[in-house]
Amino acid sequence: MFGRHYLIAFAALQVVALVNLIPSWLIGRIVDGISTDTLDTQTMIIHVVGIIVSGAAMYGLRFVWQSKLYGASIAITRVIRSELFQKFSQLSPAFYARRSTGDLMAHATNDLNAVEETMGMGVMTLVDSLIAGITVILGMIFVVSGELTAVALLPFPLLVLITRRYGVKLHKAFGKAQSAFSDLTEETRETVSGIRAVRSHGISERQEQRFGKTLDETVDANLLVAKVDAAFGPTIQLVYGLSFVISLGYGAWLIEQGSITVGLFTSFTLYLGQLLGPFMQFGWQFNVFQRGKTSWRRLEQLFAENIEVVEGDKKLPKDADASMSFDIKSFTYQKANRKALDKVKFDLPSGGLVGITGPTGSGKSTLLHLALRQFQLEKPSSIHISGMPSDSLTFGSLRSKLAWVPQKPHLFSGTIAENIALAKPDASQAEIDHVAEMAGIRAEIEAMPEGFDTSLREGGTNLSGGQKQRLTLARALLSGADILLLDDPFSALDMKTEVQVRQNLKAHYSHKTMLLVTQRLTNLIEADHILVLNDGQVEERGSHHELVANKGWYSMVYQRQSQLGQSISGDAAIQGTGIEGKDDE
């Protein structure tokens, strides 16, 4: 796709290298004319005009190859960035549990920048140094003297041996530097994102010490790269200086023998001067290619990551109902030493409400993650939607049927309206107002100075936990999905608001299928069926009244929550009568 750009650039480079020989040759002819006293005004003008025209031609051709070459490198990097972002979007949460955000950001910025520089400046200097170097050497051989050229090039094999050793060291050093930069990025991200916790716990000094240590390691790693890199220039200049001294001595001897003229030797020294540029470029591009090679290998590791959750190729029919069935023989997270779910089987009828509860860590949220196909469920376990295996469906078809309200709400940069309409960007303001009303947050939004146009800070930090939860619920309601997966959606709400939202859901969305995970058992009183999970297994199942009568975990927790609710209501009543104030007196 970009080969044409590179071919045009390389062709222009070759022409530049050839044209670049002309000025030195013309200067040599001028020197010979002066030496033999045969230079007239007309010849001088012709030679000077030739030098000026050569310079103008090289200017235009350099613009052509630079625009083509850099344009291609930027376009290639854009493709790589797009593919990397697509890869990130396809990887499962298990991958993100293994890799830090800072490390991934370093890959997406620092490593890609190194690759872009390699594809642009690196390729340019490599081809330029090869084309210009070979062209200059051929000019030295055929225009001046092959014998003198051979003598001048004697020290250069030494340069190849030395740079090879430097290259190995540079590759290792840059790999450590990139890894250190990833650690530094993650340390910075972690501190900035958790700045409230850092300040509230008074650990600013501890974080500064950790950051300082990571920063020192990063600086040391980059200093090692700089030390190796710094050796390239002096080495090349030393070898070039040795070549120049040898050429000067041998060239003087050839002039004395009458083998070459002073003008030809002048051209030769100018050619030799032109040869320094390609060799200096060779040293620089060697550095760039080592950096690019290291960064590309790091990126290759990301691209080589297996996509654990594979998309199906089927779509749900338009008239598909909203029923689900779960038959999970077992599910274990990677590198976990116990099963997250074991022998969990139940049906969720279309328009039904099934509640999931149980102690912390019993596998409730895992069940919803598997329904969303965030993790791969191995056979013979299965989850069906409208009778079709969920792993046979395209992601678009699956997720158009499901709407998820996560336990930890996530809001994106933008306005409140944009966050609510995330799954339906073309939603009208009336639709946004309605779902906000149903989620019990419309009045609070409208009380803000900018209303629904209020801009959210990163992660919605300018909203309370309850407000974020209700915005996420409103987003799910607006999506139009037939099945709502609700992961403890009322945990941050006060009782009054919770009751209001529950009543709205019952009155306006009872036709939707709901799978509700909650620790507040009053939310499950009207559920069609309730499962109590404990250590990944179904410990109890039945309706609310059946479970209360069973005198098991559900009954015990429900009674305690009921007593606590009565106690809170009593305290509120006492405060309302003013009796508490009298007691205090």
Image: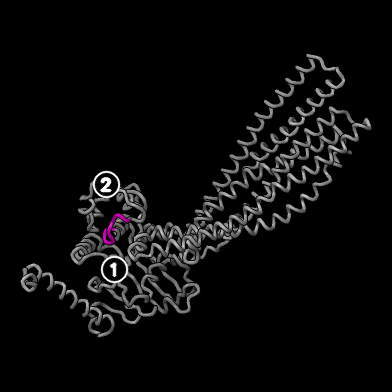
**What residue type is disc 1 on?**
Gly
**What residue type is disc 2 on?**
Gln
Quarter holding the N terminus?
Answer: top right
The residue segment tinted magenta is: 461-467
Q: Is mark 1 on a helix, strand or loop?
A: loop
Identify the coloring.
Answer: one colour
* Residue 142 in sight here: yes
Q: Residue at x 56, y 47 (%)?
A: 77
**On screen, residue 547 above or below 156:** below
Foreground: disc 1 or disc 2: 2
Q: Which residue is drawn at 60% across and 41% down?
A: 72
Q: Name the residue under label 1.
A: 352
Rendering coords of residue 400 (x, y %) = 38, 57
Judge the density around disc 1: few (<14), some (14-19), many (≥20) Cα neighbours within 10 Å: many
Upstream in sequence: badge 1 or badge 2: 1
Q: Name the residue under label 2.
A: 429
